[in-house]
Amino acid sequence: MSSDWSLWGLVLACALATYFWRGTGVFVSGRLDTDRPVFRWLACVAYATLAALIARIVFMPAGILEETALWQRLLASALALAVFLLTRKNLFLGVIAGGAGLMLIKVMSDGVVSGLHW
Amino acid sequence: MSELGEGTASALRRAWLQGMREAGGTPAAVLGAGYIGFGALARDADFSLLLSLVSTFAIWALPGQIALIELYNLGTAAPALILAVMLTAARFFPMTASLLPSLRHPRWRAPHYYLAGHLVAMTGWAVAMRRFPQMRRVERLPYFLGFTVLLWLACAAGTIIGYQLSYLFTDLVTLGLVFLNPMYFFLVLCGETRSRLGVTALLCGAIAGPLLHLLVPEWSLILAGVLGGTLAFLLLETGQRRS
């Protein structure tokens, strides 16, 4: 039971830690005019952070994606982008191609895999 | 639409429904599917269903939620775990600070803005950055709330489905589901970003991210955002002055 409560505490602490940035962003934005250069700089930082996050997940993932090789993730990403562009930017098909593609590449190149329950 | 309709209750309801409709197709399906992966991971980590749902509603950031589960599984000490989740969430500061000024209207009050701030996440943000310039100011907040609340509910549903069906998933399926999200974010940013500012900053960040991760893994995301974003900003400013 005590471990249950500590887990709740952990999740709530993570929620607060996440909201800290959003709340601070709202607070600061009340003092910004959208025409000021600092607004454009913040937008640049936001876009760059998102791109960095995605690049890091593809190049250096943590957790279950670590079970795949870099080339497998890159190939699946290229597949997702290709399908996305070939279907006139159909997000759904592009994303499915990425996810299904990674599973397929994994199975075909590794065959039956030891250890994990594939 | 005539200017007469601006700000009336029915115009605001239309904006709210419009947001829901636009979120209801692919965004809800794909993000919801990503949360199926999260639900399955949460069950494997022995989280209760209620706690998994609370994490979806209260954290509302898939990379952070997955980091929480995976670090918890590794037995990471609580302060280090919370710090790691906090660092992955730092992106919300520039995202919220850059989006919120264009949501403001005398009609809305602080609680509206702090609620909208909580709902800021990649999809809603990228769509709003593109859509807002063509939208009447007063209708932006209801549109944004409609869009993000629907996504929120779809992801809660995804969490429940993944949690309940996790026994069906092999690691291969979970792998595919977890990979849906970076792919979704990748394509959303490719598809929704039309501005020169956005494209330049995305490229700078994509290069800075992995490089900095090699040097300073813990801080790479914040540093890549600040350094990559500043580089993009300087490139754009000097380019503009010359032209």
Image (spheres, coloured by chain):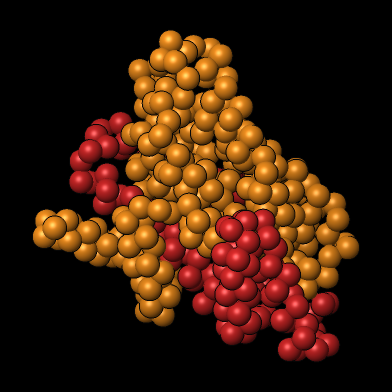
The quarter of the picture where the C terminus of chain B appears is bottom left
**Number of on-image labels:** 0
Q: Is residue B50 left or right of residue B124?
A: right
Residue, x 54% and y 25% (percent of image)? B15
Please indicate, yes or no, whether residue B218 appears anywhere in the rendered image.
yes
Q: Is residue B150 above or below residue A93?
A: above
Which of B166/B129 is in front? B129
Residue A36 in the figure: left or right of residue B50? left
Residue A98 in the image: state x and y as whole percent. Answer: 65, 69
Residue A9 at what x, y percent from top left?
Answer: 61, 47
* Residue A101 position within the rendered picture, expressed as x and y whole percent measured from the top left: 70, 74
Name, please, the residue furthest toward the right: B168
Say which residue appears at 44% left-offset and 15% top-offset.
B2
Name the residue at 54% across, 60% down. B187
Q: Nearer the viewer, residue B160 or B5?
A: B5
Q: Is residue A13 above or below residue A96?
A: above
Q: Nearer the viewer, residue A78 or B148?
A: A78
Q: Quadrant of residue B203?
A: bottom left
Figure colour of chain B: orange
Image location of residue B118, percent across then percent down: 50, 38
The red one among the chains is A
What residue lies at 46% left-to-right and 24% top-to-bottom?
B139
Q: Is residue B128 left or right of residue B153?
A: left
| Rendered view: A38 above or below A104 | above
Which picture quadrant has residue B41?
bottom right
Evaluate whether residue B72 shows in this view. Answer: no
